[in-house]
Amino acid sequence: MIEKEPKKGQGVYITPEEIAQITREIPRKMNLSSAAKNASKKLGYHITRLRGRGMSFAESRAYQPGDEIRHIDWRVTARTGEVYTKTFEEERDRPVFTLVDQTSSMFIGTKRCFKAYLAAELALSFSWLACRNQDPFGGMFIGAEPTRTRLRSGRKHWAHYCEHLLDTNQSWDLTQDNTQMNWAETFRTMQQEIRPGSLIVIISDFFNHDIDPQDLFQLRAHSDVICIGVQDPIEIKPPENAGPVGFNGNKWYYKGKGTDQQRLMKSYQNRWNSMKSMCAEMGIGFFTTSTHEKALNHMEAILR
């Protein structure tokens, strides 16, 4: 863990002060109850409703002798002409597990922040919402050295989660060797950590999108999954006469002679479309985010 003074660089490295600010800015009314449900609506799939605590409405069904009168669904009864009663179910904790990409390709940005910074903001936002609701949360942070926190609840665990994320984010520097996502190994580890019924949030630029659909399907079998793609405007539309420069395996753009702009744009779009198609086939919500907007704006769009 970080023992020295945290690195500071606006929009590059996340700091403890910025974590505190992120949690302060999240509205009290914001919650995770609609994340996977709304994603599935857009795709035309049914997905398990995200649950909190207490008793919640499950469905209305035809009245049966012995049903409580106070549970009669008067709206449905009036509409159908037959007596219907509301049924309820006990709500459970909803574990939230975040997979946060902090590999080399994430440390680029031409607007408000680096992609890695935005990914950290989003992960912190999801986990803070879970913590605030007293739900278990945990995560995997993939950077120079993969690390993870188990699913736990409480403010003490929140500090532990933040420490791991800070350590991974702050471990990057220009001199380190290239790091890439190893999706197969990462998903195997996640299977050991995740409880059935969890909400899994995968945050990455999917630069290395060598993902076996079967691995993703296994996660989706017992949990709700959403993927958040992080991008920078320069990737969507590179400058004219731009070309890739190899820098520790990353693709950095420069102004000058290089490969054709249209080819770069097509290659990027193909990668993005491949991920979207894979997710759509499995009923997984895929959301795109960009470094020119604050994480809170993206959270509001995802949870709307």
Image (spheres, rainbow, N blue to C red):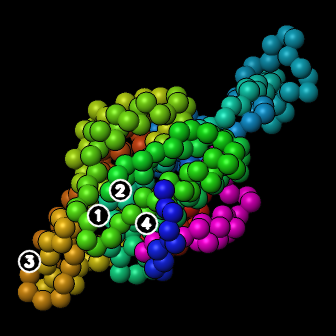
Measured along the vertical axis of the image, is residue 98 above or below residue 270? above
What residue is drawn where x is 70% and y is 39%? 52
Q: As drawn, which residue projects farthest toward the front? A: 3
Percent of width and height locating residue 46: 50, 36
For marks 2 and 3 on the same chain, the one whose residue lies earlier in the sequence: 2
Q: Mark 3 points at which residue?
A: 259
Q: Mark 1 points at which residue?
A: 104
For marks 2 and 1 on the same chain, the one whose residue lies earlier in the sequence: 1
Percent of width and height locating residue 138: 54, 44
Any part of residue 24 in sight: yes
Separation of residues labelled 3 and 4 (CA atoms): 33 Å
Q: As drawn, which residue projects farthest toward the right? A: 70
Q: Residues in magenta?
A: 11-33
The kind of residue on which mark 3 rests is Thr
Q: Quadrant of residue 206?
A: bottom left
Asked whether 129 or 20 is in front, the reply is 20
The kind of residue on which mark 2 rests is Gly
For marks 3 and 4 on the same chain, the one whose residue lies earlier in the sequence: 4
Lateral position of residue 154 relative to residue 83, left or right: left
Separation of residues labelled 1 and 4 (CA atoms): 12 Å
Q: Does the magenta stretch include residue 183?
A: no
Q: Mark 4 points at which residue?
A: 170
The kind of residue on which mark 4 rests is Gln
Q: Mark 2 points at which residue?
A: 143
- The label nearer to you, 3 versus 1, is 1
